[in-house]
Image (cartoon, rainbow, N blue to C red):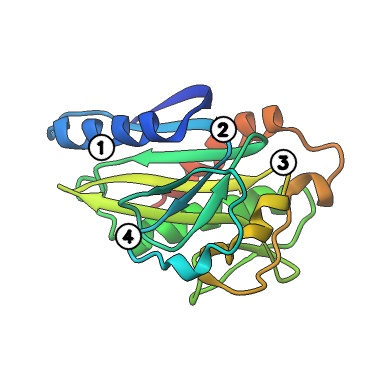
């Protein structure tokens, strides 16, 4: 099953979120799956079960209550955001399977760069030496997934200090540029889709 990749550049959060919802509501059994790659202007987003106590000092960064899973996270320029509009039933994937395959794609990509990364069962996402480099939050509705992955590449990490990332107090964040100074967002946009295709389409 083919997947259409769309590269959307730097975008405000809410219009893209609403577009994901419309895509999911309008899809039918023959609708091609899509993956969107983009960056967002600075924003905090809360998951459906998000607790206000995890927002400590938002400064002037807007906070948006969303319909994804998980707690609060931050998006900003230099973070590669990947949204998965997939018919999970057609692909025979349970939501947790999809999360694991996305995690495995990122872990495999980091391995190519010589970076050892792991996933954690208690906290979806990808970690390097105890620090979180990528966060995951999905929603499945009418057999279609949306929302997805936020991969810290070359960004300002300071806004993460204003929250308990993903609901974990004192969780340290990192980014690819800190581990691999030559890394670039363009490089990730080219490489990550290849790993995602391999993992999502795996038997």
- Which residue in the protein does label 4 denote? 48
Point 45% across, 61% down: residue: 100
> Looking at the picture, how far across and down is residue 150, in whole percent?
55, 47
> Looking at the picture, how far across and down is residue 201, in whole percent?
39, 45
- Label 4: few (<14), some or many (≥20) within 10 Å? some
Q: Secondary structure at mark 3?
A: loop
Mark toward the start of the polypeptide (1 vs 4): 1
Residue 149 relative to residue 111: left or right? left
Which mark is nearer the camera, 2 or 1?
Answer: 2
- Which residue in the protein does label 3 denote? 155
Residue 123 relative to residue 179: left or right? left
- Label 2: few (<14), some or many (≥20) within 10 Å? some
Tag 2 near tag 4, CB within 8 Å: no
Q: Secondary structure at mark 2?
A: loop
Disc 2/disc 4 C-alpha distance (Å): 21 Å
Disc 2/disc 3 C-alpha distance (Å): 11 Å
Residue 40 relative to residue 46: left or right? right
Disc 2/disc 1 C-alpha distance (Å): 20 Å
- Which residue in the protein does label 2 denote? 41
Disc 4/disc 3 C-alpha distance (Å): 26 Å
Q: Secondary structure at mark 1?
A: helix
Q: Quadrant of residue 56?
A: bottom right
Point 71% across, 54% down: residue: 111
- Which residue in the protein does label 1 denote? 21
Tag 4 near tag 3, CB within 8 Å: no
Point 42% across, 39% down: residue: 83
- Label 1: few (<14), some or many (≥20) within 10 Å? some
Q: Secondary structure at mark 4?
A: loop
Point 41% across, 63% down: residue: 70
Q: Does the image show residue 75?
A: yes
203 and 8: which is toward the camera: 8
């Amino acid at each position: 099953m083919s997947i259409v990749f769309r590269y959307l550049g730097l975008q405000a959060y809410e219009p893209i979120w609403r577009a994901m919802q419309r895509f999911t509501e309008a899809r039918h059994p023959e609708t091609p799956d899509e993956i969107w790659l983009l960056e967002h202007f600075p924003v905090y987003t809360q998951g459906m079960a998000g607790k206000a106590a995890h927002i400590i000092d938002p400064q002037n960064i807007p906070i948006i209550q969303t319909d994804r899973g998980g707690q609060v996270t931050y998006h900003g320029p230099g973070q590669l955001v990947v949204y998965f509009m997939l018919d999970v039933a057609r692909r025979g994937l349970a939501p947790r399977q999809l999360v694991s395959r996305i995690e495995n794609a990122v872990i495999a990509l980091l391995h190519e760069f010589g970076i050892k990364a792991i996933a954690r069962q208690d906290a979806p996402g990808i970690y390097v030496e105890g620090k979180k480099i990528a966060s995951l939050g999905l929603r499945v509705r009418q057999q279609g997934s949306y929302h997805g992955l936020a991969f810290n590449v070359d960004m300002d990490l300071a806004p993460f200090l204003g929250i308990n990332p993903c609901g974990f107090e004192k969780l340290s964040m990192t980014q690819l540029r800190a581990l691999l100074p030559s890394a670039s967002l363009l490089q990730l946009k080219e490489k990550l889709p290849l790993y995602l295709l391999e993992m999502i389409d795996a038997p």
